[in-house]
Image: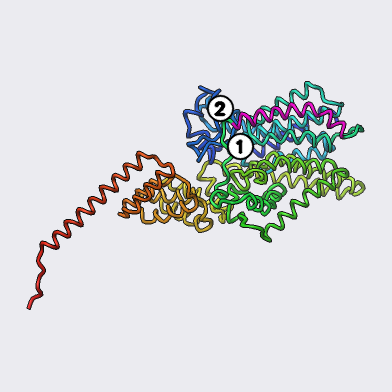
Amino acid sequence: MTRGAWWGFALAIAGLALAAAWSSLGNGFAYDDIYVITRDANRMHTLAGWWREFATTYWLSDARAAGDGYRPLTILAFKAQWVLGGGKPLLFHAVSVGVHVVTAVLVYWLAGATLPRAAAVAAAALYAVHPVHVEAIANVVGQSELVVALLVVLAMGLYLHGRVAGPLSWRRWAVITVLYGIALLFKEHAITLIALLPLAELVMVHDREDWRRRLVRMRLPLLVLALVAVAYLWVRSIVVVGSGFLPYIVFQGLDLSTRDRVLTMIGASPEWLRLLLWPARLTTEYAPPYVEVAQGISITQLPGLLLLVGVLGLIAATWRRSPATAFGIAWLVITLSPSSNFLLPAGFIIAERTLLLPSVGAMIAVASVITWLYGRFEYRPAARYAGVAALMLLVGLGLARSHSRNPVWRDNEALFRQGLKDSPDSYRVHFMLGTLLFQQGKKVEAERHYRIALRLFPYDPVMVYSLAEHYRGARMCGPALPLYEVYFQIAPSTARGRLGHVQCLLVTRRLEDAREAALLAIRHGAPVRTARRLLEAIRVAEDSLAARQARGDTLRKATPPTRPAG
């Protein structure tokens, strides 16, 4: 293929990606954008002290229960965009669209090292318009996913295209290593690149030399990459606590074992396949009861188990017969693993944005089928035309779906209202909409959605606590008290909400219970000064009650009994 033809296809892919994503340019800030970008002016709205981000978690402790994640370059990118764009969301969304367009072209370049030209064009076109990418593109915080995808695809393209000419030069290895380090500082799942490189060598590189010798030749460059990864993990371990990830609130509320978390994801795994192959239905929240949380082994997990076994079997079956298929599926498995909840608990069950990088492998695998079909129908022009028409139809459907879906992320009002239509049986949709409505002062409608959410899934401690606090703020301690009690049953070691519980007990004159709750709050780490003030208020209330009772007793003794008339 001539260079002019290659660039012609590249421009066509870029045009498709732009057409699919440009409707997000009118969006504002929504969902996690609010917490990460807009609310923390001291951190996000200035470049002053930018170097401190290398010693700071992505989520700050005042934004969530504890700081987690380590993505300093993502935060620096947001800070720079805020300053350059004057705080307007347009620049943020333009950057996201631009990164997506470049990545789509790079996917075409990468696929060209694994597939014939027509199949490479198909893989890139499907990637460019894939509706599952909307969340990463249309929501600003998805930029970390977009940049990691760009850098990983670029690094893999450099490797595969370089191997065509023979062993990689140290200069090319150095570029790949730098890309790896940068990608890690944008988001943690970039660490999978170190597994993708030997995969590419074993499956896609056509070299007569024994594979063992080839891997030995890669030993030193891979060791350097491993040192980069270890250095990153070491710094990250200093900055964040534990694994650095807050488990999904559902996993916390039910106190799920590792086994039940894995079983939950086995049951949910068909949803990954649906989102990658037929993403007609999209939603912001994949939560119970829409997704079943496992409480032990169940027959409902069987389809997911068969799917996972089938995927691994398909990799083995196509390893020799169709290397591009095996490469694409293995890419999908490797890049999905960090956010799969199989290895470590993630902050969600399924999130569409985390399928961005895995979809590269999925589209390469899908496009590899085109090569197989081409050989099968070489002498049947009608079948070929039908295949081309089907592919164009898929690209058109993806383009239309992505274009129409982007404005859903315009703001929280649009997002949560649409979420209610997309997944009315997801408790978190009702919870998030109820929270927004409380902020807007629409208390009756907000309470209704909270009650629906509690009926669908009553084990989310944050949701129970939130409604209790809203009731207390509205001076409705009657309905707040049972919610506090449920909350403490779900999260018995928490200090949050303890003093609010004491206040409601005090208001309802349950003074003995209030005293016990105040002492318990101190033992759980609640602010001691506030707890002591409440204890003093309880003492005053008890003294007042005792004085009234004493006056009543005195009055009854001083008043002679009256005799009935007659």
Vertical side of 446 occupied by 20: above or below: above
Query: Would you say residue 136 is visible in this rendering?
Result: yes
Magenta highlight range: 212-237
Specify whether residue 526 is painted magenta. no
Residue 508, percent across and down? Answer: 32, 54
Q: Quick one: 222 or 51, which is closer to the camera?
A: 222
Q: Residue at x 49, y 37 (%)?
A: 63
Mark 2 or 1: the one toward you: 2
Secondary element at tag 1: helix
Relative to 448, does residue 535 appear above or below in the rendering? Answer: above
**Residue 133 figure quarter:** top right
The residue shown at (51%, 29%) is 44
Quadrant placement of the C terminus:
bottom left
Amino acid beneath label 2? Ala
Chief SS of the magenta region: helix
Q: Nearer the viewer, residue 377 or 178?
A: 178
Mark 2, other Cα within 10 Å: few <14 / some 14–19 / many ≥20: some
User: Which residue carries the number 1 mark?
Assistant: 142
Return the residue at label 2.
55
